[in-house]
Image (cartoon, rainbow, N blue to C red):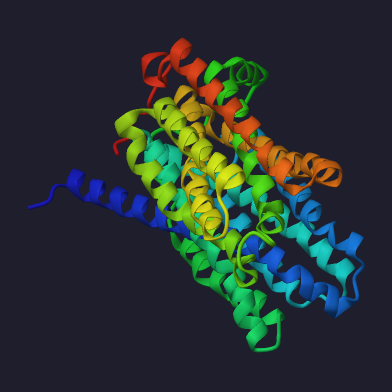
Amino acid sequence: METATDEETTREFDGRRWWTLAVFAFVALEGATLQMQGAIIPVLRTTFGTAQWQLGLVSPAGTVGFLVFVAAVGAVAGRLETRKLLLVGVAGTGGSVLLMGLVPSFGAFLVVLLVRGAFAGIGRGSDRPLLSHLYPRRRGQLFGYYDMMWAVGATLGPLVVTVALWMENWRLAYYALAASFLPLVALIWFLPSPSVESGDDPLTLAGVRRIVQNPAVMVMAAGILFSTGVEGGLFTWLTTYADGRVPASLVTVSLSILLVAYIPGRFAAGSLSERFGYLPLVFGLGSLCLVGAVYTFVFAAGLGVLVGVFCIGVGLSGLYPTLLAYATESAPTHSAPINALALVVSSCGIAGVPTLMGFVIERSGIAVAMRLLLVPIVGLLVVALVAWARLGTVADTTRTVDSTGD
């Protein structure tokens, strides 16, 4: 016969499982929404007669709102209820996606994209910190699975656009994705507040100083800047590099191969993080990424380029969640600000490196620019190796895990 305590434990387990499902579903849908942008740009030009330079505003419009609100959520964490933040973020993102399919002009599309980024920032600023508190002893594993779900959505997003174009109406892609948010909004609406023994402490100036001066956080920031810089370079210029090096029918597929590699890569990173430790895993993944990049951009030709791209994707994909888990372990009661910092730094890397590569391509060609991606990869390996030697693992130094069960 179950006791009251047994029943309470069962309810907490079920609640945690449903909240995990909600977080994973949201990040998958958000990934699909984000990656749909690249596939929809040519259609926007045809539909609205948009100039090429105006199309370049799509990425900044989505990023500005996201960065502002994800930073704001990190600042107010511990003062506002996570359930309400997630509900606002998820419902607002879904409603914005619907409006993106209804816009009458390109200008309206940019405005709605800005709003969508803001709501996505509220949701993404809240969801991973919630996982951190639900699974305090399995952060690395759950962060890896979380980013794996993003990769699943990011891979499916362009396919939704492709199906809509087959049906000769690109707006159907946004209608279908908006409808997918409805059951998720209903789930969060009816779920009770997540049960965690300890959440984020309200952020103070003293807390900010502790976060900024935390060696693990500095390692995370440097590592994420390097790794996401490589991601941004690949997301922007990989198809340009593949053009003329692989069969014409596989040029656009090269980017899909990179994204598909993220799914097993992030699953493996999540599964292995607790076994090998965060910094050893970062060094191993970075080494795989370096080997893949050298092969792809120095030696490979034809279909070998696609093999190398998959290898890069497997190694690169696990770096962000592993580095974030490493830093969060050092200050688990400030998981939201650390998450916000990671997202801001990653956006800078993703936006900054492709811009620099554009100048190199103009002067020296695409091959030289892609080989320069070896520099941030080596930088990442140096950061990981020095941190490993000087700091050890978080468990050896400052780890203070919450007492909530697994």
Residue at the image point whose x is 62% and y is 34% from the top: 374
When asked about the image quadrant of residue 243, the answer is bottom right
Residue at the image point whose x is 36% and y is 50% from the top: 16
- In the visual, does 15 lie left or right of 51? left
**Position of residue 157 measured from the top left corner of the image (x, y, whole percent):** 59, 67
Figure label count: 0
When asked about the image quadrant of residue 405, the answer is top left
- In the visual, does 281 lie left or right of 11? right
> Furthest residue to the left?
1
Image: 169 above or below 27: below
Residue at the image point whose x is 56% and y is 45% from the top: 299
**Residue 273 seen anywhere in this rendered image of the structure:** yes
Residue at the image point whose x is 64% and y is 61% from the top: 35
**Position of residue 236 measured from the top left corner of the image (x, y, whole percent):** 71, 53
Towards the viewer: 157 or 290? 290
**Position of residue 121 measured from the top left corner of the image (x, y, whole percent):** 66, 49
**Residue 104 seen anywhere in this rendered image of the structure:** no
Image: 203 above or below 23: above
> Furthest residue to the top?
390
